[in-house]
Image: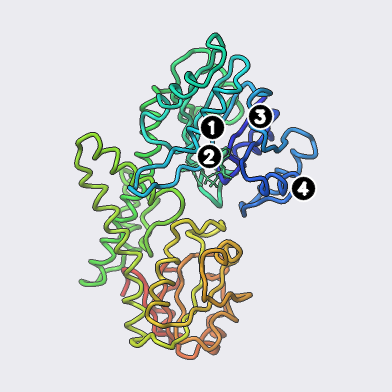
Amino acid sequence: MKICCVGSGYVGLVAGTCLADMGNDVICVDVDENKINNLKKGIVPIYEPGLTDMLDRNSREKRITFTTNIKEGIQKSEVVFIAVGTPPDGDDCANISAVISVAENIGRYINGYKVIVNKSTSPVGTLDKIEKVIKSFRKNPSVKYDLVSNPEFLREGEAIKDFTNPDRIVIGVQSKKAKNIMASIYDGISRTDKPIMFTDIRSAELIKYASNAMLATRISFMNEMAQLCEKVGGDIKAIARGIGLDSRIGPRFLQAGVGYGGSCFPKDVKALIQTMKSNGIEAGILAAVDKVNEKQKRSLIHKIKKLVPTLNGKSIAIWGLAFKPKTDDMRDAPSLVIINQLQEAGAKVKTFDPEAQKTAKKILKGVTYCKDPYTTVAGCDALVIVTEWNEFRDIDLKKIKQLLKHPNIVDGRNIYEPQEMKKLGFNYLCVGRK
Ligand SMILES: NC(=O)c1ccc[n+]([C@@H]2O[C@H](COP(=O)([O-])OP(=O)(O)OC[C@H]3O[C@@H](n4cnc5c(N)ncnc54)[C@H](O)[C@@H]3O)[C@@H](O)[C@H]2O)c1
Protein backbone atom coordinates (compact mmCIF):
# COMPACT_ATOMS: atom_id res chain seq x y z
CA MET A 1 0.00 0.00 0.00
CA LYS A 2 1.20 3.53 -0.73
CA ILE A 3 0.86 5.59 2.43
CA CYS A 4 1.53 9.22 3.27
CA CYS A 5 2.04 10.34 6.90
CA VAL A 6 1.59 14.05 7.30
CA GLY A 7 3.40 15.20 10.44
CA SER A 8 6.69 13.50 11.31
CA GLY A 9 6.75 13.91 15.08
CA TYR A 10 6.49 11.29 17.82
CA VAL A 11 3.35 9.76 16.31
CA GLY A 12 3.78 10.36 12.57
CA LEU A 13 7.38 9.23 12.44
CA VAL A 14 6.79 6.12 14.52
CA ALA A 15 3.62 5.23 12.58
CA GLY A 16 5.34 5.89 9.23
CA THR A 17 8.38 3.81 10.16
CA CYS A 18 6.33 0.90 11.50
CA LEU A 19 4.02 0.97 8.47
CA ALA A 20 7.11 0.88 6.21
CA ASP A 21 8.48 -2.01 8.24
CA MET A 22 5.21 -3.83 7.62
CA GLY A 23 5.97 -3.63 3.88
CA ASN A 24 4.15 -0.46 2.81
CA ASP A 25 5.67 2.36 0.75
CA VAL A 26 5.59 5.38 3.05
CA ILE A 27 6.16 9.06 2.35
CA CYS A 28 6.62 11.12 5.53
CA VAL A 29 5.71 14.80 5.14
CA ASP A 30 6.42 17.67 7.51
CA VAL A 31 6.40 21.47 7.32
CA ASP A 32 9.65 21.55 9.34
CA GLU A 33 12.39 21.68 6.69
CA ASN A 34 15.16 21.14 9.17
CA LYS A 35 13.48 17.98 10.48
CA ILE A 36 12.97 16.60 6.97
CA ASN A 37 16.56 17.40 5.91
CA ASN A 38 17.86 15.63 8.99
CA LEU A 39 15.61 12.63 8.41
CA LYS A 40 16.90 12.40 4.83
CA LYS A 41 20.41 12.15 6.31
CA GLY A 42 19.28 9.50 8.78
CA ILE A 43 19.25 11.88 11.76
CA VAL A 44 16.22 11.07 13.92
CA PRO A 45 14.89 14.22 15.64
CA ILE A 46 13.48 12.46 18.71
CA TYR A 47 14.69 9.91 21.20
CA GLU A 48 12.57 6.78 20.91
CA PRO A 49 14.11 3.36 21.64
CA GLY A 50 14.52 1.22 18.50
CA LEU A 51 13.34 3.93 16.11
CA THR A 52 16.71 4.82 14.54
CA ASP A 53 17.52 1.21 13.66
CA MET A 54 14.09 0.54 12.18
CA LEU A 55 14.20 3.79 10.23
CA ASP A 56 17.71 3.10 8.88
CA ARG A 57 16.68 -0.33 7.67
CA ASN A 58 13.55 0.89 5.91
CA SER A 59 15.31 3.93 4.41
CA ARG A 60 18.02 1.65 2.99
CA GLU A 61 15.36 -0.62 1.52
CA LYS A 62 13.62 2.48 0.11
CA ARG A 63 10.29 1.82 1.79
CA ILE A 64 10.28 5.21 3.53
CA THR A 65 11.11 8.66 2.16
CA PHE A 66 10.85 12.20 3.52
CA THR A 67 9.63 15.42 1.97
CA THR A 68 8.20 18.85 2.73
CA ASN A 69 6.20 18.59 -0.48
CA ILE A 70 2.72 17.70 0.72
CA LYS A 71 1.33 17.70 -2.83
CA GLU A 72 3.69 14.90 -3.79
CA GLY A 73 2.91 13.00 -0.59
CA ILE A 74 -0.83 13.17 -1.13
CA GLN A 75 -0.83 12.50 -4.87
CA LYS A 76 1.44 9.46 -4.70
CA SER A 77 -0.55 7.78 -1.91
CA GLU A 78 -3.71 5.73 -1.52
CA VAL A 79 -3.98 6.39 2.20
CA VAL A 80 -3.12 9.67 3.94
CA PHE A 81 -2.56 9.65 7.69
CA ILE A 82 -2.85 12.99 9.48
CA ALA A 83 -0.49 12.99 12.50
CA VAL A 84 0.15 16.66 13.17
CA GLY A 85 0.12 18.28 16.60
CA THR A 86 -3.06 19.41 18.36
CA PRO A 87 -1.66 21.52 21.21
CA PRO A 88 -3.88 23.40 23.61
CA ASP A 89 -5.02 26.84 22.53
CA GLY A 90 -5.36 29.72 25.00
CA ASP A 91 -8.75 28.43 26.20
CA ASP A 92 -7.61 24.84 26.93
CA CYS A 93 -9.39 23.58 23.77
CA ALA A 94 -7.41 21.47 21.29
CA ASN A 95 -5.99 23.67 18.57
CA ILE A 96 -6.78 21.76 15.38
CA SER A 97 -5.47 24.41 12.97
CA ALA A 98 -2.66 22.11 11.74
CA VAL A 99 -5.21 19.34 11.06
CA ILE A 100 -7.37 21.80 9.13
CA SER A 101 -4.36 23.05 7.17
CA VAL A 102 -3.60 19.45 6.13
CA ALA A 103 -7.26 19.01 5.14
CA GLU A 104 -7.00 22.12 2.94
CA ASN A 105 -3.98 20.61 1.19
CA ILE A 106 -5.76 17.29 0.75
CA GLY A 107 -8.66 19.17 -0.85
CA ARG A 108 -6.28 21.10 -3.11
CA TYR A 109 -4.22 18.14 -4.28
CA ILE A 110 -6.48 15.11 -4.15
CA ASN A 111 -6.14 13.36 -7.51
CA GLY A 112 -8.11 10.14 -7.09
CA TYR A 113 -9.80 7.97 -4.44
CA LYS A 114 -8.02 8.10 -1.09
CA VAL A 115 -8.63 7.08 2.49
CA ILE A 116 -7.97 10.04 4.78
CA VAL A 117 -7.12 8.85 8.29
CA ASN A 118 -6.99 11.21 11.23
CA LYS A 119 -4.52 10.02 13.88
CA SER A 120 -4.13 13.38 15.59
CA THR A 121 -6.02 13.54 18.88
CA SER A 122 -8.85 15.89 17.94
CA PRO A 123 -12.19 16.70 19.57
CA VAL A 124 -15.32 14.83 18.59
CA GLY A 125 -16.69 16.31 15.38
CA THR A 126 -13.26 17.06 13.86
CA LEU A 127 -13.77 14.60 11.01
CA ASP A 128 -16.89 16.54 10.00
CA LYS A 129 -14.78 19.70 9.89
CA ILE A 130 -12.11 17.93 7.81
CA GLU A 131 -14.80 16.78 5.40
CA LYS A 132 -16.17 20.32 4.98
CA VAL A 133 -12.70 21.73 4.34
CA ILE A 134 -11.77 19.05 1.81
CA LYS A 135 -15.05 19.63 -0.02
CA SER A 136 -14.55 23.38 -0.14
CA PHE A 137 -10.95 23.10 -1.42
CA ARG A 138 -11.53 20.18 -3.82
CA LYS A 139 -11.16 21.28 -7.43
CA ASN A 140 -12.79 18.21 -8.95
CA PRO A 141 -16.00 17.27 -7.05
CA SER A 142 -16.11 13.84 -8.69
CA VAL A 143 -12.92 12.75 -6.88
CA LYS A 144 -13.95 10.41 -4.09
CA TYR A 145 -12.46 9.80 -0.64
CA ASP A 146 -13.37 8.22 2.66
CA LEU A 147 -12.70 9.59 6.10
CA VAL A 148 -11.47 7.48 9.00
CA SER A 149 -10.73 8.23 12.64
CA ASN A 150 -7.87 6.03 13.87
CA PRO A 151 -6.69 7.45 17.20
CA GLU A 152 -3.21 6.56 18.36
CA PHE A 153 -2.56 5.06 21.79
CA LEU A 154 1.23 4.62 21.68
CA ARG A 155 3.30 5.66 24.69
CA GLU A 156 6.53 7.54 24.17
CA GLY A 157 9.44 5.34 25.20
CA GLU A 158 7.47 2.22 24.17
CA ALA A 159 6.20 3.61 20.89
CA ILE A 160 7.47 0.93 18.48
CA LYS A 161 6.24 -1.87 20.72
CA ASP A 162 2.90 -0.17 21.23
CA PHE A 163 2.38 0.49 17.53
CA THR A 164 3.31 -3.02 16.44
CA ASN A 165 1.71 -4.81 19.39
CA PRO A 166 -1.20 -2.61 20.50
CA ASP A 167 -3.88 -3.62 23.00
CA ARG A 168 -6.41 -2.66 20.34
CA ILE A 169 -6.69 -0.68 17.15
CA VAL A 170 -9.69 1.63 17.09
CA ILE A 171 -11.08 2.56 13.70
CA GLY A 172 -14.05 4.83 13.21
CA VAL A 173 -15.28 4.39 9.66
CA GLN A 174 -18.45 4.65 7.60
CA SER A 175 -17.64 3.04 4.26
CA LYS A 176 -17.06 -0.67 3.63
CA LYS A 177 -14.27 0.09 1.15
CA ALA A 178 -12.32 2.17 3.69
CA LYS A 179 -12.97 -0.46 6.37
CA ASN A 180 -11.38 -3.15 4.19
CA ILE A 181 -8.40 -0.94 3.34
CA MET A 182 -7.80 -0.17 7.03
CA ALA A 183 -8.16 -3.86 7.92
CA SER A 184 -5.55 -4.79 5.31
CA ILE A 185 -3.11 -2.14 6.60
CA TYR A 186 -3.32 -3.55 10.13
CA ASP A 187 -3.65 -7.16 9.02
CA GLY A 188 -0.20 -8.12 10.32
CA ILE A 189 -0.70 -6.81 13.83
CA SER A 190 -4.30 -7.56 14.78
CA ARG A 191 -4.96 -10.82 16.61
CA THR A 192 -7.95 -12.31 18.36
CA ASP A 193 -6.84 -11.08 21.76
CA LYS A 194 -5.68 -7.70 20.41
CA PRO A 195 -8.43 -6.87 17.96
CA ILE A 196 -9.24 -4.16 15.52
CA MET A 197 -12.35 -2.51 16.83
CA PHE A 198 -14.46 -0.95 14.11
CA THR A 199 -16.92 1.63 15.27
CA ASP A 200 -18.59 4.84 14.17
CA ILE A 201 -16.45 7.93 13.67
CA ARG A 202 -17.68 9.94 16.66
CA SER A 203 -17.20 7.03 19.06
CA ALA A 204 -13.62 6.54 17.79
CA GLU A 205 -12.89 10.22 18.33
CA LEU A 206 -14.30 10.01 21.86
CA ILE A 207 -12.54 6.72 22.74
CA LYS A 208 -9.15 8.44 22.56
CA TYR A 209 -10.16 11.20 24.96
CA ALA A 210 -12.01 8.80 27.26
CA SER A 211 -8.91 6.54 27.46
CA ASN A 212 -6.53 9.32 28.41
CA ALA A 213 -9.04 10.85 30.80
CA MET A 214 -9.58 7.49 32.53
CA LEU A 215 -5.82 6.92 32.95
CA ALA A 216 -5.31 10.47 34.21
CA THR A 217 -8.18 9.90 36.66
CA ARG A 218 -6.45 6.83 38.11
CA ILE A 219 -3.25 8.81 38.61
CA SER A 220 -4.97 11.76 40.29
CA PHE A 221 -6.98 9.39 42.47
CA MET A 222 -3.80 7.70 43.68
CA ASN A 223 -2.10 11.06 44.24
CA GLU A 224 -5.02 12.10 46.42
CA MET A 225 -4.84 8.79 48.32
CA ALA A 226 -1.10 9.43 48.77
CA GLN A 227 -1.91 12.72 50.49
CA LEU A 228 -4.16 10.83 52.89
CA CYS A 229 -1.44 8.22 53.53
CA GLU A 230 0.95 10.99 54.48
CA LYS A 231 -1.52 12.35 57.03
CA VAL A 232 -2.81 9.15 58.62
CA GLY A 233 0.00 6.67 57.95
CA GLY A 234 -0.19 4.01 55.29
CA ASP A 235 1.90 3.16 52.27
CA ILE A 236 0.58 4.18 48.85
CA LYS A 237 2.64 1.40 47.22
CA ALA A 238 0.87 -1.19 49.39
CA ILE A 239 -2.45 0.39 48.51
CA ALA A 240 -1.63 0.31 44.79
CA ARG A 241 -0.76 -3.37 45.08
CA GLY A 242 -3.75 -4.12 47.26
CA ILE A 243 -6.27 -2.59 44.90
CA GLY A 244 -4.37 -3.53 41.74
CA LEU A 245 -4.66 -7.22 42.58
CA ASP A 246 -8.42 -6.82 42.25
CA SER A 247 -9.05 -7.95 38.69
CA ARG A 248 -11.83 -5.39 38.38
CA ILE A 249 -9.24 -2.66 38.94
CA GLY A 250 -5.94 -4.03 37.60
CA PRO A 251 -2.44 -2.87 38.52
CA ARG A 252 -1.56 -0.21 35.96
CA PHE A 253 -1.58 3.59 36.30
CA LEU A 254 -1.83 3.38 40.07
CA GLN A 255 1.55 4.92 40.91
CA ALA A 256 1.49 8.09 42.97
CA GLY A 257 4.16 10.62 42.10
CA VAL A 258 4.74 14.18 40.99
CA GLY A 259 1.61 14.34 38.82
CA TYR A 260 1.10 13.45 35.18
CA GLY A 261 2.65 15.51 32.40
CA GLY A 262 3.61 15.09 28.78
CA SER A 263 2.07 15.99 25.49
CA CYS A 264 -1.18 14.08 25.97
CA PHE A 265 -2.82 13.69 29.41
CA PRO A 266 -2.80 17.35 30.51
CA LYS A 267 -4.00 18.76 27.20
CA ASP A 268 -6.47 15.95 26.48
CA VAL A 269 -8.10 16.15 29.92
CA LYS A 270 -8.43 19.92 29.55
CA ALA A 271 -9.77 19.64 25.99
CA LEU A 272 -12.37 17.04 27.05
CA ILE A 273 -13.50 19.35 29.85
CA GLN A 274 -13.96 22.10 27.24
CA THR A 275 -15.89 19.75 24.92
CA MET A 276 -18.20 18.89 27.81
CA LYS A 277 -18.64 22.54 28.73
CA SER A 278 -19.47 23.53 25.18
CA ASN A 279 -22.14 20.83 25.23
CA GLY A 280 -23.65 22.04 28.49
CA ILE A 281 -22.21 19.25 30.64
CA GLU A 282 -20.42 19.97 33.89
CA ALA A 283 -17.14 18.02 33.81
CA GLY A 284 -17.13 17.40 37.58
CA ILE A 285 -14.81 14.38 37.61
CA LEU A 286 -12.35 15.70 35.06
CA ALA A 287 -12.17 19.16 36.58
CA ALA A 288 -11.16 17.48 39.86
CA VAL A 289 -8.62 15.24 38.07
CA ASP A 290 -7.00 18.29 36.53
CA LYS A 291 -7.06 20.26 39.79
CA VAL A 292 -5.51 17.41 41.80
CA ASN A 293 -2.78 17.08 39.19
CA GLU A 294 -1.91 20.77 39.20
CA LYS A 295 -1.72 20.62 43.00
CA GLN A 296 0.44 17.50 42.90
CA LYS A 297 2.97 19.08 40.53
CA ARG A 298 3.26 21.97 42.99
CA SER A 299 3.45 19.79 46.11
CA LEU A 300 7.05 18.60 45.86
CA ILE A 301 8.39 22.02 46.83
CA HIS A 302 6.77 21.64 50.28
CA LYS A 303 8.68 18.40 50.81
CA ILE A 304 11.91 20.04 49.65
CA LYS A 305 11.29 22.90 52.11
CA LYS A 306 10.83 20.42 54.96
CA LEU A 307 14.43 19.32 54.40
CA VAL A 308 15.86 22.66 53.23
CA PRO A 309 13.68 25.34 54.88
CA THR A 310 15.51 28.31 53.34
CA LEU A 311 16.09 27.70 49.66
CA ASN A 312 17.62 31.05 48.80
CA GLY A 313 21.22 30.51 47.72
CA LYS A 314 21.03 26.72 48.19
CA SER A 315 21.98 24.18 45.51
CA ILE A 316 19.37 21.60 44.58
CA ALA A 317 20.06 18.63 42.31
CA ILE A 318 17.26 17.47 40.01
CA TRP A 319 17.39 13.99 38.50
CA GLY A 320 15.11 13.66 35.50
CA LEU A 321 13.64 16.35 33.25
CA ALA A 322 11.56 14.43 30.70
CA PHE A 323 7.92 13.93 31.66
CA LYS A 324 8.63 10.21 31.93
CA PRO A 325 11.55 7.81 31.35
CA LYS A 326 12.70 6.67 27.90
CA THR A 327 11.73 9.89 26.12
CA ASP A 328 13.24 13.31 25.52
CA ASP A 329 9.79 14.95 25.52
CA MET A 330 9.55 17.90 27.90
CA ARG A 331 6.02 19.03 27.01
CA ASP A 332 4.15 19.82 30.23
CA ALA A 333 6.83 18.00 32.24
CA PRO A 334 6.41 18.33 36.05
CA SER A 335 10.16 19.14 36.20
CA LEU A 336 9.40 22.52 34.61
CA VAL A 337 7.06 23.47 37.47
CA ILE A 338 9.40 22.24 40.19
CA ILE A 339 12.50 23.94 38.74
CA ASN A 340 10.56 27.17 38.29
CA GLN A 341 9.46 27.07 41.96
CA LEU A 342 13.04 26.40 43.09
CA GLN A 343 14.41 29.26 41.01
CA GLU A 344 11.72 31.61 42.31
CA ALA A 345 12.78 30.69 45.85
CA GLY A 346 16.36 31.65 44.95
CA ALA A 347 17.81 28.14 44.73
CA LYS A 348 20.51 27.14 42.25
CA VAL A 349 19.49 24.12 40.19
CA LYS A 350 21.87 21.45 38.89
CA THR A 351 20.30 18.76 36.77
CA PHE A 352 20.80 15.57 34.80
CA ASP A 353 18.56 13.67 32.40
CA PRO A 354 19.87 10.83 30.21
CA GLU A 355 18.02 12.00 27.08
CA ALA A 356 16.08 15.24 27.59
CA GLN A 357 18.91 17.73 28.22
CA LYS A 358 19.08 18.89 24.60
CA THR A 359 15.34 19.63 24.61
CA ALA A 360 15.51 21.14 28.10
CA LYS A 361 18.27 23.59 27.13
CA LYS A 362 15.84 25.25 24.71
CA ILE A 363 13.27 25.79 27.49
CA LEU A 364 15.03 26.02 30.85
CA LYS A 365 17.45 28.84 31.52
CA GLY A 366 19.73 29.44 34.50
CA VAL A 367 20.15 25.72 35.15
CA THR A 368 23.46 23.84 35.30
CA TYR A 369 23.31 20.72 33.11
CA CYS A 370 25.56 17.90 34.34
CA LYS A 371 27.05 14.88 32.61
CA ASP A 372 25.91 12.18 35.02
CA PRO A 373 23.88 11.67 38.23
CA TYR A 374 26.96 11.81 40.47
CA THR A 375 28.37 15.17 39.31
CA THR A 376 24.84 16.58 39.60
CA VAL A 377 24.58 15.97 43.35
CA ALA A 378 28.12 17.10 44.24
CA GLY A 379 27.93 19.86 46.86
CA CYS A 380 24.11 20.06 46.76
CA ASP A 381 21.84 20.64 49.74
CA ALA A 382 19.28 18.15 48.46
CA LEU A 383 18.56 15.77 45.62
CA VAL A 384 15.09 15.72 44.05
CA ILE A 385 14.05 12.80 41.83
CA VAL A 386 11.47 13.87 39.24
CA THR A 387 11.68 11.19 36.51
CA GLU A 388 12.14 7.50 37.28
CA TRP A 389 14.89 6.60 34.78
CA ASN A 390 16.39 3.15 35.48
CA GLU A 391 19.80 4.83 35.78
CA PHE A 392 18.62 6.30 39.09
CA ARG A 393 17.38 3.01 40.53
CA ASP A 394 20.70 1.32 40.01
CA ILE A 395 22.95 3.86 41.69
CA ASP A 396 25.70 3.84 44.31
CA LEU A 397 23.75 5.51 47.13
CA LYS A 398 26.75 5.51 49.50
CA LYS A 399 28.65 7.57 46.95
CA ILE A 400 25.63 9.88 46.55
CA LYS A 401 25.62 10.45 50.32
CA GLN A 402 29.31 11.35 50.28
CA LEU A 403 28.86 13.76 47.36
CA LEU A 404 25.81 15.61 48.73
CA LYS A 405 26.55 18.50 51.08
CA HIS A 406 23.58 17.37 53.19
CA PRO A 407 22.06 13.88 52.86
CA ASN A 408 18.61 15.09 51.80
CA ILE A 409 16.58 13.27 49.16
CA VAL A 410 13.05 14.04 47.97
CA ASP A 411 11.92 11.16 45.82
CA GLY A 412 8.98 12.23 43.68
CA ARG A 413 8.72 8.76 42.09
CA ASN A 414 9.08 6.41 45.08
CA ILE A 415 12.01 4.57 43.52
CA TYR A 416 13.77 3.75 46.81
CA GLU A 417 12.68 2.01 50.00
CA PRO A 418 12.24 4.39 52.94
CA GLN A 419 13.67 1.89 55.46
CA GLU A 420 16.84 1.34 53.45
CA MET A 421 17.29 5.06 52.92
CA LYS A 422 17.00 5.61 56.66
CA LYS A 423 19.60 2.90 57.30
CA LEU A 424 21.93 4.60 54.84
CA GLY A 425 21.54 7.83 56.82
CA PHE A 426 19.49 9.88 54.38
CA ASN A 427 16.76 12.33 55.29
CA TYR A 428 14.38 10.81 52.80
CA LEU A 429 10.92 12.01 51.81
CA CYS A 430 8.82 10.35 49.14
CA VAL A 431 5.15 10.36 48.05
CA GLY A 432 2.48 8.72 50.19
CA ARG A 433 4.90 6.63 52.28
CA LYS A 434 6.13 7.22 55.79
N1 LIG B 1 3.20 11.94 21.52
C1 LIG B 1 2.41 10.97 21.94
O1 LIG B 1 2.77 10.17 22.78
C2 LIG B 1 1.03 10.81 21.35
C3 LIG B 1 0.33 9.62 21.57
C4 LIG B 1 -0.94 9.48 21.02
C5 LIG B 1 -1.50 10.52 20.30
N2 LIG B 1 -0.80 11.68 20.12
C6 LIG B 1 -1.41 12.74 19.32
O2 LIG B 1 -0.85 12.67 18.02
C7 LIG B 1 -0.74 13.99 17.46
C8 LIG B 1 0.71 14.28 17.10
O3 LIG B 1 1.46 14.28 18.29
P1 LIG B 1 3.05 14.27 18.28
O4 LIG B 1 3.47 14.03 19.68
O5 LIG B 1 3.54 13.37 17.21
O6 LIG B 1 3.35 15.79 17.89
P2 LIG B 1 4.73 16.40 17.39
O7 LIG B 1 4.68 17.83 17.76
O8 LIG B 1 5.86 15.56 17.88
O9 LIG B 1 4.68 16.25 15.81
C9 LIG B 1 3.80 16.96 14.99
C10 LIG B 1 4.52 17.23 13.68
O10 LIG B 1 3.59 17.81 12.77
C11 LIG B 1 4.26 18.77 12.00
N3 LIG B 1 3.28 19.67 11.41
C12 LIG B 1 2.58 20.66 12.01
N4 LIG B 1 1.74 21.24 11.13
C13 LIG B 1 1.90 20.60 9.96
C14 LIG B 1 1.30 20.73 8.69
N5 LIG B 1 0.35 21.63 8.46
N6 LIG B 1 1.70 19.91 7.69
C15 LIG B 1 2.67 18.98 7.93
N7 LIG B 1 3.26 18.81 9.11
C16 LIG B 1 2.89 19.59 10.13
C17 LIG B 1 5.20 19.44 13.00
O11 LIG B 1 6.26 20.12 12.35
C18 LIG B 1 5.67 18.22 13.82
O12 LIG B 1 6.85 17.66 13.27
C19 LIG B 1 -1.31 14.92 18.52
O13 LIG B 1 -2.65 15.16 18.24
C20 LIG B 1 -1.16 14.14 19.81
O14 LIG B 1 -2.09 14.53 20.78
C21 LIG B 1 0.44 11.85 20.61
Residue 102 is tagged as 1
Q: Residues within 10 Å of mark 1 (few under 14, many from 20)?
A: many
- Residue 302's x, y, as percent? 31, 76
Task: Check disc 4 and give the amino acid type.
Answer: Lys
**Going from the N terminus, do you reach mark 4 or mark 1 first?**
4
The residue identified by callout 4 is 41
| Mark pair 2, 1: CA separation | 8 Å
The residue located at (58%, 43%) in the rendering is: 161
Q: Quadrant of the N terminus?
A: top right
Query: Which circle's residue, 2 or 1, is located before the other in the chain?
Result: 2
Give, as a three-letter code, the residue at label 3: Gly
Is the C-beta separation of discs 2 and 1 under 8 Å? yes
**Residue at mark 3: C-beta within 8 A of ligand 1:** no
The secondary element bearing badge 2 is classed as loop
Task: Tell whether circle 2 marks a residue whose Cβ is less than 8 angstroms from ligand 1.
Answer: yes
Give the numbered dot on residue 73: 3
Q: Is residue 175 above or below residue 241?
A: above
Q: Residue furthest top?
A: 142
In the picture, the quarter occupied by the C terminus is bottom left
Kind of element beneath mark 1: helix
Q: Callout 3: few (<14), some (14-19), or many (20+) C-alpha neighbours within 10 Å?
A: many
Does residue 371 appear anywhere in the picture?
yes
How far apart are the two marked residues, 4 and 2, measured between alpha carbons?
22 Å
x and y percentages locating residue 23 in the rendered image: 70, 29
Q: Mark 3 falls on what kind of element?
A: helix
- Tag 2 residue: 84
Q: Amino acid at mark 2?
A: Val
Does ligand 1 reach within 8 Å of label 1's beta carbon?
A: yes
